[in-house]
Amino acid sequence: MTATSAPGQGAEYAATASEAYQAALRVIESVEPRIADATRKELADQRDSLKLIASENYASPAVLLTMGTWFSDKYAEGTIGHRFYAACQNVDTVEALAAEHARELFGAQYAYAQPHSGIDANLVAYWAILATRVEAPGLAELGAKNVNDLSEADWESLRAKMGNQRLLGMSLDTGGHLTHGFRPNISGKMFYQRQYGTDPATGFLDYSAVAAAAREFKPLVLVAGYSAYPRRVNFAKMREIADEVGATLMVDMAHFAGLVAGKVFTGDEDPVPHAHVVTTTTHKSLRGPRGGLVLATEEFAPAVDKGCPMVLGGPLSHVMAAKAVALAEARQPEFRTYAQAVADNAQAMADGFIKRDAGLVTGGTDNHLVLLDVTSFGLTGRQAESALLDAGIVTNRNAIPADPNGAWYTSGIRFGSPALTTRGFGADEFDRVADLVVEVLKNTQPATGPNGPSKAKYTIADGVAARVHAAATELLDANPLYPGLTL
Ligand code: PLP
């Protein structure tokens, strides 16, 4: 067991998990063997590659096994103790435990465990903010007993009020998420939106520019949080800005929830005491099942609790059960060791790039991710991503601020430390990872097609991909994924 493993994992745990998976695969095989094969192959592929995608991790067998049960078969629309379906007593137990662990872990007044994903969590949060903050006449004032009594004119006026609100969020190219007001997402269409960015000279968030934009635009919702910003955010400052203009502060901590849970981000860097509403995914640095969570102050709790039926259907009870297990793991002291290692390892990886003269957005990191500007290698993000994959290094291309290659080809590669830290990688291994990445990129050239230089095609010098892959395999073999788990 490494210091970064989930609690309770040891030889006996691995042997029991092996038995469980072997039996499960035999059962699956008896119906659709190709799915059993693909499942085995997925583990083999994950074991054999350097997973550096910043939004991915490896959940524990306990978390994964929890998802494969009959809770999947149960409908439970509604809330704990107040369901639109019969026989939900065990779902109530599960949802209450997930919410309790989330409240305790994050010190939140209220937690809602139903969102199926991060996008769903953000939709729940937006509707909760609209429902709580937009002054619309209640049913009684409109002379109605229930919503069916409202006239078309009443609906028109409600739509005009709810649909014409303002949202200020971080732009996609400076690290925000598409749900933070990006035009192609519903958040960029249902709100009047404006985006704040980072300082073009440093790449750092410029709080005075955010404040100036907020003063001018007067948003109802100020969104903080990111998918590809390699730095910490001062949420106390963001709250001051929100308060000054009467906005609601929503923080999307999907990426760094593990660092909040593990107490690496505390004080002004912990969003929970500062934001009105906090959303997260549970599957990234938090190392849980694929899903979402909303945390809120008591003021917003009643509206968040209406996530179903407002924007969600029946909750995924099997996933809520797995969230409860993952959150219980994250409450153990080992998770703090893990979270600190995630931050230390990202730092080691960034230092490894810097000492090999690779350009980093903001010049480094102080969270779990590093954003490499691959224009210094003469490549697009797309070419770099593909070349790295040839060498067994799994990353994702990402736009950099004011990206000359746009959001498809991009000029950046995003690297995250959460997954390999779970495998037990330390600072020396992350330095070696930076070395291997630079070796691939230095030996990759853009290809030229009939219409000139390609943004997608590339060539790698002979033997480099194989050599790097072999070196990566050495690192991976020394830090096995799910040690002792045999299928
Ligand atoms: N919010 C942020 C900041 C994210 O990075 C992501 C996913 O990448 C999401 C929300 C959406 O999460 P999901 O893919 O679970 O909908």
Image (cartoon, helix red, strand yellow):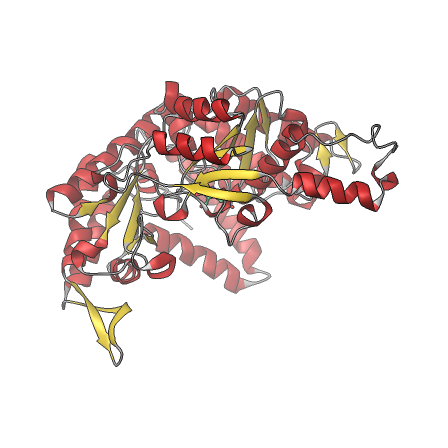
- Image quarter of residue 110: top right
Residue 463 position within the rendered picture, expressed as x and y whole percent measured from the top left:
14, 66
Q: Quadrant of the N terminus?
A: top left
User: Which residue is nearer to you in this view: 18 or 121?
Assistant: 121
Q: Is residue 314 visible?
A: no
Residue 6 position within the rendered picture, expressed as x and y whole percent measured from the top left:
40, 31
Q: Is residue 280 left or right of residue 149?
A: left
| Residue at the spot 14% in from the left edge and 67% down from the top edge | 461
Number of numbered discs visible in the structure rendering: 0
| Residue at the spot 59% in from the left edge and 37% down from the top edge | 126
User: Which residue is nearer to you in this view: 90 or 37?
Assistant: 90
| Residue at the spot 32% in from the left edge and 36% down from the top edge | 368
Is 177 placed above or below 295 here? below
Q: Is residue 323 left or right of residue 442?
A: right
Is 145 placed above or below 404 here? above
Q: Residue furthest bottom?
A: 450
| Residue at the spot 57% in from the left edge and 25% down from the top edge | 296
- Image quarter of residue 350: top left
Residue 37 position within the rendered picture, expressed as x and y whole percent measured from the top left:
46, 61
Q: Is residue 400 left or right of residue 144?
A: left
Residue 293 position within the rendered picture, expressed as x and y whole percent measured from the top left:
55, 34
Q: Is residue 450 visible?
A: yes
User: Which residue is nearer to you in this view: 5 or 350?
Assistant: 350
Q: Residue furthest front?
A: 216
Is 60 placed above or below 357 here? above
Q: Is residue 156 left or right of residue 323?
A: right
